[in-house]
Image (cartoon, helix red, strand yellow):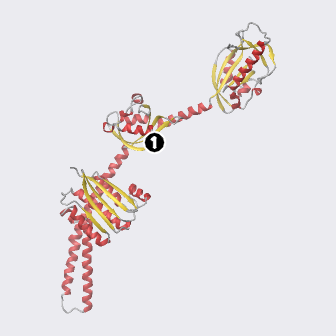
Amino acid sequence: MHISALMLPVNSEEWPDCTGWGPQRRWELGSSKTKTASGGQEEFLHANEKHLRQIFDQIPAVLWTTDRELRIISASGAALALANLGAEDLIGKPVQEFLGDPGERSPSVAAHLAALQGEQGTCEHNLAGRIFSLKIHPLRGLNGQISGVIGVAFDVTENKRALASVAKLAAIVESSQDAIISVTPSGYITSWNRAAEQMYGYSAQEVIGQHISITVPESRKNEPDLVLERLRRGETVKSYETVRQCKDGSLIDISMTLSPVKDAAGRVISVSAIAHDLSDRKQVEMELRKLSARLLKVQDEERRNMARELHDSVIQMLAAAVINLSMLMDAVGLLPEARKTLEDTLKITEDAVREIRTFTYLLHPPLLDAMGLNSALRWYVEGYSKRSGVHVELDLPENSERLPNEVELTLFRIVQEALTNIHRHSGGRSATISMQKRERNLVLIITDDGHGMDAQTLEKVKREGAVLGVGIAGMKQRLQQLGGRLEISSGRQGTSVTATLPIGS
């Protein structure tokens, strides 16, 4: 049989302390009509009271009662230990001493005074360096009269710290210049900061509860599902550059970092996305590409002009000098010493003509304009092999149609730069150049049998065009202007440079 009892104080008698609560007033069953108990009833009261006090001592709070003078008459609860207190430290002391707050106007003491007037109160109080939430109520006897105050204090320190941390994070999110968005693992928006409102043009009220696909242009509709699938597997997606659509239909370039948010069991419960607007950077990059294109064009024009000037003036003058020296050689009566000097001078002048002519061809090969890319490459490779000692095999398409001048010049410069790097850096003795059409692309591949580059150097070359000077960057820039791309691979067997250019049907 289950017996429920309410323990109430009886003011006429006190029990000796047998529980650690200090001197206690006598308690009786609230349902009893008499103030006396004997035999089994007395044993039941003691057992019930002991059981209740064991429960109270384990409650993660501090519980106390006072008399009308606000002297503490009982105290219990596991949270006493957090305040470095025991029940024996509090019994008989004014509640102000327990709270360390003697002022009547302080919220905690004022709440106790109000409870004596029948009011209930709640406040927060700092006790032994921790924050407690106090709930103060009147304590009534059997006759309904207020005999004191009953209070309970819950330690809310960690909650306060967590709330402060959340508030701080919320402030950071709201003040961020980047869009910070949270979505469910299936892609439905749960938070949307001020920067996201400014970036996309949607207010938080408009998008929360909507699927993130509302920001994705039609051409990329499959993108969210693919990315979310990776996130649901627990992957993090970093610096993901893509295009998104604003409320007004305009498109923006962004870089996104997406991270899965997991619960204690390791399940993905949310996704955090940080989006940075790349519009300014893309604009600067476009301006730089335009500037680079103009610089490359000016460079090519200056090379052409310089080659023409050297050919039309310096080479012609040197050629005339060769003719004159040859005529002097045929003159009679020359002393042997004079003839030897003339022979040396003639040879030096002929070598100068040959070197300057080669230099002008390197500046701007006349065969490129006159005969096309294939002829210019054959001429250049033949001279390169003689000068460098590197054997080069050419595999070019026969009877191919002429390409636009800008495309032919770009491919010629890439071969020129690649072969120069082979001679200067690779240590290789042979190279291969092949050019072929693949669907709507023209693919140029230059390989060598040199010692190659280590992974760190290769990555640096790809990223910065470093080590090999400005040539790699120049090749990339020329190809990018035409919608192409440059790929470099390297290992112990040598290095391969692949240039791919779209040429249409």
Front residue of 70 and 488: 488
For residue 111, above or below residue 398: above
In the picture, the quarter occupied by the N terminus is: top right
Horizontal side, residue 266 vs residue 67: left or right: left
Q: Is residue 234 among what the camera can see?
A: yes
**Point 29% across, 54% down: residue:** 500
Q: How many marks?
A: 1
In this view, the residue farthest toward the top is: 33
- Local crowd size for mark 1, using a 10 Å CA cut-off: few (<14), some (14–19), many (≥20): some
Q: Quadrant of residue 93?
A: top right
Horizontal side, residue 66 vs residue 489: left or right: right
Q: Disc 1 marks which residue? A: 236
Front residue of 64 and 226: 226
**Point 24% across, 70% down: residue:** 310
For residue 277, above or below residue 320: above
**Point 69% across, 28% down: residue:** 78
Kind of residue at badge 1? Thr
